[in-house]
Image (spheres, helix red, strand yellow):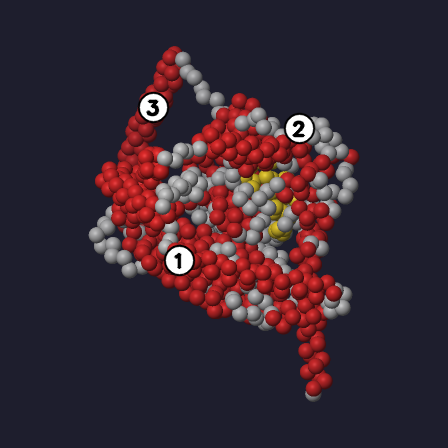
């Protein structure tokens, strides 16, 4: 697609955003009592923001124009943060991390794919070189430590190379000789057959009927296959051939995408800045000197002496030139006095209210609750609406009605760059002018007024200030347990100890799973459904990837420090951890009990280890700290076999570790567990702020999984392979079981025989039957455990409250009748 197309995508996204911001101002500011209506409002705004997010991300990734990209980036971060804020409100209202909105999607005529969270490509693109360099360093450290094996490169001698060439040449000659002999044999056989046919061959009628039989059978088979393919395409069960094959245009588009990245990184700003400095630098310098000199003369004329030159901290000549007239100063002072009097009055009111509250403690506890109920639900204040509105207004002011017919390349607008860089050039020249004018002012004071500068006093004051600053810094230095160590040395040590590991390159899209279409129906029937794999994928993107990828989003969005992935073995918990690291370019630290056993012994060993990890993770953010089998840390009783590992040593330190993480630190703690019910619930839920329950795949997800994994492992799907049957039979089996079954069948030998002997359904049945499935009893134990978590209990209370309210209404209706 051309740049004009992506410009249109951006324009459409900005229009949708403008409408959405107007809706928010109208709907969300007013309190609402009806919770069903509120939830519908939140869901619709969530879906709209998701569509805007997708379009903005596409425009930001594909557009080359740098000034446009800066505006889009600001709005894009704002939209991402707003999605997380709306999600938080949805969770608080529904008391569940998983929402079933298929009825609302049906009303809006949208598909579940439309609410799939897109992962911004700039997370990796903008720091690709740094990530590649870091990966090389980590590979080298692991190779030196013997933790990673490298494929040995075979070094040949000259004689061995000659032997290899000789063998290859003899084999080639042998093949040519065999082909020549085969040709001779076939010619001789043909001659023999023709002689026999001449002697005693069938009649012309028999030969014709034989040819007709073969030809008619062949033609009918082709027609039947074609009719079947057309029927499958018509039913929507297979794609047309034009969509299956990658076209030349797609190949060309991929090449264009790679070139776009190079164009986006051109450094034209430096050139324009240098040109501005050459062309306009002297004029700016002269005008500034004239303005400051005029200010000196005016001050001397009004006050009777030259003014003191403002310091750098005060703003220098900017502070002098921005001084107002006496009338303006008088008005400002009057306004300040009014503000101070208003603040005093407000403080008095607050103190009175506090006193009244203290007096009325224990007397009227019901009034506050009734007030909240009467007021209804109201949207919490947002940190991102101002960012979006600012970006939207910037778009309207500069880009909405801008004529870009002259800009064929769509690379950059030099005039806009000049406007931005002119301020920087002025600031740089102003610093030089300040130094010159300070000297000039001293000379004027000496010549006219006979004043002298007191340098010694200023120096002493400066020394005193420095001393106080040093005193403030001392406690911070005491907190650092490794003050003499560099980040590189700590990084190397953690990698050598096996605490910093290499993440596998797995994308979130590789976690295949379908959306559940029965969620709303099951909830209406008073049964809580198990979440689908698409819901899990969405939560990982919202809580894990988006905040780690963007600094603005992480600082201002609802903060999630720790994430727990709970589910049976083989559902892809570790894969999701690696996917978070791959999509954001994060470092991966392994703090599993089995991995840290025996490392950093002693009383303060764990504390030093966590301090080192935290220091490196903060410096080289984003980072993910992973704890596998995390229930062992909070277990009720440690088994005898695991006593040596001492898994409970992290239980007391982890809350301190999380406290040390601030909003600006893009560090996420992720725990995975197969048996969460073995842990003490209270400390477990205190550490892990968000809990994501991962189920076994349903029929739709299994159907897609079988197809995806067979094709991924080199298999081919034909009519002999019934995927629907495999999906039905594998009920209760996880993704891990399906992967193992496919890999066991598709060996190297089987792949070589694929063309002659296509895959059949029965081949996968035997390898699948050797594995133990996840039974319904185990799934029920997971559901029962999740119901005991804080969010699960809140959900149960809300359901009980709605049932009681429904019964009350029915009883009132009966009484009236």
Is 524 rendered above or below residue 566?
Answer: below
CA neighbours of label 3 inside 10 A, class few (<14), some (14 to 19), many (20+): few
Q: Is residue 603 left or right of residue 78?
A: right
Tag 3–tag 2 contact (CB < 8 Å): no
Q: Quadrant of residue 404?
A: bottom left
Residue at the (59%, 67%) spot, across then down: 377
Q: Residue at x 57, y 57 (%)?
A: 88
Answer left or right for 265 relative to 489. Answer: left
User: Can residue 147 be seen here?
Assistant: no
Image quadrant in which you'd find residue 624: top right
Check contact, mark 1 vs mark 3: CB within 8 A.
Answer: no
Q: Dot 2: few (<14), some (14–19), or many (≥20) neighbours within 10 Å?
A: few
Q: Which residue is mark 3?
A: 172
Q: Which mark is residue 328?
A: 1
Q: Residue at horizontal 62%, vertical 34%?
A: 475
Please tell me which residue lies in front, 525 or 644. 644
Q: Residue 24: percent from the left, percent from the top?
A: 48, 65
Q: Which residue is mark 2?
A: 599
Disc 1: CA contacts within 10 A as few (<14), some (14-19) or many (>=20): few
Q: How many marks?
A: 3
Question: Is label 2 or label 1 in front?
Answer: 1
């Amino acid at each position: 697609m051309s740049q004009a197309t992506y410009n249109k995508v951006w324009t459409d996204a900005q229009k949708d955003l403008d409408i959405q911001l107007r809706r928010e101002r109208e709907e969300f500011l007013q309190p609402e009592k009806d919770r069903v209506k509120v939830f519908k409002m939140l869901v619709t705004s969530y879906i709209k923001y998701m569509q805007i997010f997708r379009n903005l991300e596409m425009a930001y990734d594909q557009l080359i124009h740098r000034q446009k990209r800066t505006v889009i980036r600001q709005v894009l971060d704002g939209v991402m943060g707003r999605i997380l804020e709306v999600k938080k409100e949805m969770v608080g209202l529904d008391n569940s991390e998983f929402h079933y909105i298929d009825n609302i999607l049906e009303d809006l005529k949208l598909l579940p794919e439309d609410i799939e969270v897109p992962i911004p490509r700039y997370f990796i693109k903008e720091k690709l070189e740094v990530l590649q360099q870091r990966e090389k360093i980590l590979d080298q450290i692991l190779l030196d430590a013997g933790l990673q094996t490298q494929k040995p490169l075979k070094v040949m001698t000259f004689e061995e190379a000659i032997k290899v060439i000789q063998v290859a040449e003899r084999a080639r000659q042998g093949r040519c000789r065999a082909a020549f002999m085969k040709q001779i044999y076939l010619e001789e056989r043909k001659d023999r057959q023709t002689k026999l046919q001449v002697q005693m061959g069938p009649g012309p009628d028999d030969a014709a009927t034989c040819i007709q039989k073969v030809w008619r059978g062949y033609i009918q088979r082709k027609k039947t296959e074609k009719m079947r393919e057309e029927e499958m395409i018509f039913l929507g069960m297979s794609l047309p051939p034009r969509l299956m094959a990658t076209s030349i245009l797609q190949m060309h588009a991929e090449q264009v995408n790679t070139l776009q990245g190079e164009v986006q990184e051109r450094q034209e700003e430096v050139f324009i800045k240098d040109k501005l400095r050459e062309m306009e630098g002297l004029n700016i310098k002269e005008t500034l000197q004239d303005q400051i000199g005029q200010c000196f003369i005016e001050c001397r004329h009004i006050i009777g002496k030259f003014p003191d030159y403002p310091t750098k901290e005060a703003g220098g000549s900017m502070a002098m030139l921005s001084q107002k007239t006496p009338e303006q100063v008088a008005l400002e002072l009057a306004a300040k006095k009014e503000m101070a009097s208003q603040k005093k009055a407000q403080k008095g009111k607050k103190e009175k209210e506090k006193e009244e509250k203290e007096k009325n403690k224990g007397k009227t506890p019901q009034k506050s609750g009734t007030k909240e109920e009467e007021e209804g639900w109201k949207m919490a204040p947002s940190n991102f609406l101002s960012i979006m509105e600012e970006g939207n207004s910037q778009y309207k002011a500069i880009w909405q009605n801008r004529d870009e017919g002259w800009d064929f390349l769509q690379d950059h607008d030099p005039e806009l760059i000049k406007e931005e860089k002119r301020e920087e050039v002025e600031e740089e020249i102003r610093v030089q002018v300040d130094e010159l004018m300070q000297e000039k002012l001293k000379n004027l004071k000496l010549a006219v007024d006979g004043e002298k500068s007191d340098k010694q006093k200023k120096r002493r004051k400066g020394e005193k200030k420095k001393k106080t600053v040093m005193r403030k810094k001392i406690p911070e230095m005491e907190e650092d347990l490794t003050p003499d160590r560099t980040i590189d040395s700590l990084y190397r040590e953690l990698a050598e100890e096996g605490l910093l590991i290499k993440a596998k390159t797995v994308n979130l899209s590789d976690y295949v799973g379908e959306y559940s279409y029965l969620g709303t129906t099951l909830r209406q029937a008073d049964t809580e459904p198990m979440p689908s794999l698409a819901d899990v994928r969405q939560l990982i993107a919202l809580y894990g990837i988006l905040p780690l990828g963007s600094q603005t989003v992480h600082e201002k969005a609802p903060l999630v420090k720790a994430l727990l992935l709970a589910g049976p073995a083989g559902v892809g918990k570790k894969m999701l951890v690696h996917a978070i690291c791959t999509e954001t370019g994060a470092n991966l630290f392994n703090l599993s009990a089995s991995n840290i056993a025996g490392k950093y012994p002693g009383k303060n060993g764990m504390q030093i280890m966590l301090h080192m990890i935290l220091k490196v993770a903060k410096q080289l953010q984003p980072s993910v700290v992973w704890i596998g089998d995390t229930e062992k840390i909070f277990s009720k009783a440690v088994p005898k076999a695991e006593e040596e590992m001492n898994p409970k040593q992290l239980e007391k330190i982890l809350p301190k570790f999380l406290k040390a993480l601030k909003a600006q630190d893009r560090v996420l703690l992720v725990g995975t567990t197969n048996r969460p019910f073995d842990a003490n619930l209270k400390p477990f839920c205190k550490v892990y702020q968000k809990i994501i329950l991962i189920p076994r795949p349903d029929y739709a997800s299994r159907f897609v999984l079988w197809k995806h994994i067979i094709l991924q492992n080199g298999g081919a799907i034909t009519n002999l392979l019934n995927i629907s049957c495999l999906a039905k039979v594998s009920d209760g089996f996880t993704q891990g079981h399906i992967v193992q079954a496919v890999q066991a069948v598709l060996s190297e030998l089987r792949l070589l025989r694929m063309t002659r002997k296509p895959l059949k359904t029965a081949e996968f049945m035997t390898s699948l039957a050797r594995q133990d499935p996840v039974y319904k009893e185990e799934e029920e134990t997971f559901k029962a455990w999740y119901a005991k978590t804080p969010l699960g209990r809140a959900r149960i209370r809300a359901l009980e409250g709605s049932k009681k309210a429904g019964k009350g209404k029915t009883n009132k209706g009966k009484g009236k009748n």
